[in-house]
Image (spheres, coloured by chain):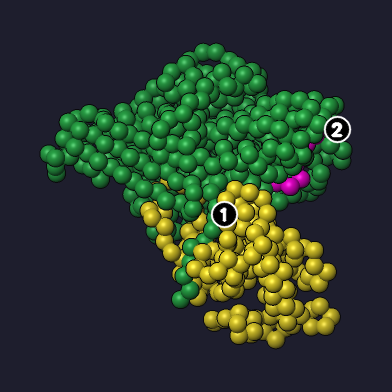
Chain colours: A green, B yellow
C-alpha cells in the first residue's frame, strides 16, 4: 500500500449534520510532514448569545437549555448560577442538592449514550450501533435501560425530560415528591448489575495506545467530585476563581473554524471526563475508584482514547453520588420553598458547571433585570486546540500505516472527545414514497 | 397491519403520545414545541393523551415513545414543499434521506432517522408512528415561527384533535371496537 501514502497523505472526513453544525477532519501530509491537520467546526452557541441579549433574566436559563439537547441541564444550571451571582442570590441547600442531583443524572445519561452508542461499536469493529442492536440487542437494551433511569431522574427534578422547566432563578417552581425520589433511588441502586456488565464489556476491549501529555483543567472543590461551582484548577499547577475564567480560556481566533481556540499554560488544554478524573481522583467514591482500578485507569493517564474509560468511572461516580444525595434529601425531607429573590436587578456574574464534555461557562451582564451582554464558552470549544494537537501527533506517528486505519484512528480520537455540535437544527430530510 | 391516516380508520383505544420535536431557538424548527403548547391550551383534550415537548434529543424521544402503541411526532421537515405546507404520514410511507457519513462524530447528534432505525432494530417502537411534517421557511437562529408556519400550527392542532376525537365516544371513553388489537 502505498509508498505514495508515505509521501502524501490526504484525509478528508466530512461530517454534514443537518443544516449548520458540522465537524470536518482535514489532514494533509507531504514527505513525512504534517502540513495541515484541522478539525473544522461551526460553533453555534456563539449565535445564541445574541438571543439572550435584551431578554429578562428569568428567561435566560430556559433559553440556554435549548442550546443543546444533551447538555440541557448543565446549560440551564450554569445560566442560573451566572444570573444568581449577578443579582446577589444565594440558593438554599435543598436547591443546591437538587441541582447537583440533576447534573449527575445528565452526566450518566450522556456518558451512557457516548460509550455504548459511539465508542463500543468502534472498539467492537462493527462500525455503528445498528449491527450491535441486531447481533447483541441485550447490550443496547442495557444502555437504554440505564439511560431511562437517568432521564426519569432528570424529569422528576426538572419537571420535563431533556429541557428542564422547573429550575428557576433562586430555586425550583416544582419539587419531586418523596415517593418519586425514593423510587428513582431504588432504580439507581438496581442499576448495579448493568454497571457491572458495562465494566465487564469494556474491560475486554482494547484501546489504541496513543499517548500525549497536555494540560488538564477542571472545576475543583473541597471534599467533593466537583460538578457545580468551586474553582478552576490546572494539572500544571494553579487555581483560578470562576469569575477569572477568561484568564484560563484565553480564546483566540483561528482561520479554519468559527469556534475560537483556547489555551492556558501550554498551547492547548483538555477538559472533560479524563481531566476531572485526573484532578479530582482523591474525591472519587470508593466504588468508582475500584472500577477505575478494574479498568486499569490511573490518575496519570495521558491517553485521550481513555476519556471513554474515565466516562465509565464517572457513570459509577454519579450513580453513587445521586444515591447519596437522594438519601440526604429524603432524610431532610423535601420541603416547599419559594425561590430566593434577587437582592438587586443589575450586576455581572459568571457561572460554571462540569458538563459531560467538560467545563461550561456562562457570563452575563444584567441591567435593570435585562441581560445586556452574554458570553458562553463550551467544553467543545476549549477542547478544539487540544484535539488538533493530538491529531497532529497521531498522524505524525502513523505515516507508514495504511490510510484507512489512520482515518479510523483519527475518527476514533475525535469521537473520544465527543465534540458537541448538536446545537444545530433537528430538521428532518424526508422523501415520500 | 398498515394504516394510513388519510383513511380515517385509525385503530381506537391505543395508548397515544404526542411529541413536539425541534429547537424553538431556530425559528421554524420550533414548530413541534408550538403545536404542543397549542394542544395544551385546547379544552377538548382526551384525558389519557400524553403530550411532551421533547426538544432536540431524538434518542430521548425514542425512549419516551416506549410503552406507547402509537406516537404522533411534530417536526420541521424538508420534503420540497412550500413553506408552511404540512402532511401527516405514517413513517412507513416515507424514507429519510441519509446524511453523509452519519456515524462519524456523535450519536449525540443522531437525528430522528437514527433513533427510529435503532428503535426498529430493537423492536421497541410503537406499533404506529405518524409524523406531522412541516416545511420550514426559515431556520436561522431566532425565536418565533414565520407567518407561513404559524398558520400551520392551528391547522395541525385541529387535525390532530379531530383524529383523536373520532376515536372517542360521546362520554370521552375510547371506542373499544378493536381493543384486543
Q: Pick whichever, B20 or A21, lies toward us.
A: A21
Question: Residue drawn at (64%, 25%), measured in percent from left and top?
Answer: A224
**Left-right relation of B53 to B98:** right
Quarter of image, res A136: bottom left
Quarter of image, res B68: bottom right
Quarter of the rendering occupied by the N terminus of chain B:
bottom right
Quarter of image, res A230: top right
Residue that label 2 marks: A341
Question: Residue drawn at (61%, 67%), measured in percent from left and top?
Answer: B84
Question: Residue drawn at (81%, 31%), measured in percent from left and top?
Answer: A368
Q: Is-magenta flag for residue A307?
A: no
Residue that label 1 marks: B139
**Residue at the far top in the pictured view:** A238
**Left-right relation of B26 to A133:** right
Q: Is-magenta flag for residue A168?
A: yes
Judge whether B151 appears above or below A195 on screen: below
Q: Position of residue A9 (x, y in %)?
A: 22, 39
Q: Pick whichever, A76 or B152, lies toward us.
A: B152
Name the mark on residue A402. Answer: none
Q: Nearer the viewer, mark 2 or mark 1?
A: 1
Which region of the structure is painted magenta? Answer: A164-170
The secondary structure that most of the magenta stretch takes on is loop
Quarter of the rendering occupied by the C terminus of chain B:
bottom right
Q: Pick whichever, A59 or A337, lies toward us.
A: A59
The chain carrying label 1 is B
**Left-right relation of A308 to A25:** right
Amino acid at each position: 500500500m502505498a509508498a505514495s501514502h508515505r509521501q502524501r497523505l490526504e484525509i478528508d472526513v466530512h461530517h454534514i449534520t443537518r443544516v449548520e453544525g458540522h465537524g470536518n477532519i482535514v489532514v494533509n501530509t507531504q514527505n513525512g510532514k504534517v502540513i495541515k491537520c484541522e478539525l473544522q467546526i461551526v460553533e453555534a452557541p456563539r449565535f445564541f448569545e445574541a438571543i439572550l441579549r435584551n431578554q429578562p433574566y428569568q428567561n435566560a436559563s430556559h433559553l440556554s437549555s435549548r442550546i443543546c439537547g444533551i447538555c440541557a441541564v448543565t446549560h440551564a444550571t450554569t445560566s442560573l448560577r451566572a444570573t444568581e451571582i449577578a443579582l446577589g442570590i444565594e440558593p438554599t441547600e435543598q436547591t443546591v442538592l437538587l441541582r447537583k442531583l440533576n447534573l449527575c443524572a445528565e452526566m450518566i445519561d450522556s456518558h451512557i449514550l457516548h460509550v455504548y452508542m459511539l465508542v463500543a461499536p468502534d472498539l467492537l469493529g462493527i462500525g455503528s450501533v445498528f449491527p450491535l442492536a441486531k447481533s447483541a440487542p441485550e447490550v443496547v437494551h442495557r444502555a437504554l435501560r440505564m439511560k431511562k433511569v437517568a432521564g426519569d431522574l432528570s424529569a422528576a427534578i426538572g419537571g420535563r425530560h431533556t429541557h428542564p422547566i422547573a429550575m428557576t432563578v433562586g430555586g425550583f417552581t416544582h419539587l419531586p415528591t418523596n415517593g418519586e425520589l425514593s423510587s428513582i433511588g431504588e432504580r439507581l441502586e438496581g442499576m448495579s448489575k448493568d454497571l457491572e456488565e458495562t465494566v465487564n464489556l469494556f474491560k475486554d476491549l482494547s484501546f489504541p495506545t496513543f499517548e500525549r501529555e497536555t494540560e488538564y483543567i477542571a472545576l475543583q472543590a473541597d471534599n467533593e467530585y466537583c460538578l457545580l461551582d468551586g474553582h478552576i484548577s490546572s494539572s500544571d499547577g494553579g487555581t483560578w476563581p470562576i469569575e477569572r475564567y477568561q484568564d484560563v480560556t484565553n480564546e483566540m481566533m483561528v482561520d479554519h473554524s468559527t469556534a475560537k481556540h483556547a489555551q492556558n499554560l501550554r498551547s492547548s488544554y483538555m477538559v472533560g471526563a479524563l481531566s476531572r478524573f485526573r484532578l479530582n481522583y482523591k474525591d472519587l467514591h470508593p466504588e468508582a475508584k475500584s472500577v477505575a482500578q478494574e479498568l486499569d485507569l490511573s490518575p496519570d493517564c495521558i491517553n485521550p482514547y481513555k476519556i471513554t474509560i474515565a466516562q465509565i468511572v464517572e457513570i459509577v461516580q454519579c450513580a453513587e453520588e445521586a444515591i447519596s444525595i437522594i438519601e440526604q434529601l429524603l432524610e431532610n425531607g423535601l420541603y416547599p420553598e419559594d425561590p430566593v429573590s434577587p437582592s438587586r436587578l443589575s450586576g455581572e456574574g459568571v457561572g460554571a458547571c462540569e458538563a459531560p464534555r467538560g467545563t461550561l461557562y456562562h457570563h452575563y451582564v444584567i441591567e435593570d433585570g435585562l441581560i445586556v451582554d452574554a458570553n458562553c464558552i463550551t467544553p467543545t470549544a476549549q477542547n478544539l486546540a487540544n484535539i488538533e494537537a493530538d491529531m497532529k501527533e497521531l498522524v505524525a506517528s502513523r505515516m507508514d500505516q495504511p490510510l484507512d486505519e489512520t482515518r479510523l484512528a483519527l475518527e476514533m480520537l475525535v469521537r473520544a472527545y465527543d465534540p458537541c455540535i448538536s446545537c444545530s437544527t433537528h430538521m428532518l430530510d424526508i422523501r415520500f414514497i | 397491519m398498515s394504516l394510513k391516516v388519510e383513511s380515517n380508520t385509525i385503530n381506537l383505544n391505543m395508548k397515544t403520545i404526542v411529541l413536539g420535536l425541534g429547537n424553538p431557538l431556530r425559528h421554524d424548527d420550533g414548530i413541534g414545541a408550538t403545536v404542543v403548547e397549542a394542544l395544551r391550551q385546547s379544552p377538548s383534550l382526551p384525558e389519557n393523551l400524553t403530550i411532551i415537548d421533547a426538544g432536540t434529543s431524538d434518542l430521548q424521544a425514542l425512549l419516551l415513545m416506549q410503552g406507547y402503541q402509537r406516537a404522533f411526532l411534530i417536526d420541521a421537515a424538508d420534503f420540497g414543499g412550500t413553506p408552511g405546507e404540512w402532511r401527516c404520514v405514517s413513517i412507513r410511507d416515507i424514507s429519510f434521506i441519509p446524511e453523509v457519513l452519519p456515524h462519524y462524530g456523535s450519536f449525540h447528534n443522531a437525528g430522528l432517522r437514527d433513533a427510529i432505525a435503532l428503535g426498529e432494530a430493537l423492536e421497541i417502537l410503537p406499533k404506529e408512528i405518524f409524523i406531522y411534517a412541516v416545511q420550514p421557511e426559515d431556520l436561522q437562529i431566532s425565536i418565533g415561527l414565520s407567518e407561513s408556519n404559524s398558520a400551520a400550527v392551528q391547522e395541525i392542532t385541529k387535525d390532530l384533535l379531530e383524529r383523536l376525537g373520532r376515536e372517542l365516544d360521546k362520554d370521552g371513553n375510547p371506542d373499544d371496537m378493536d381493543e384486543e388489537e
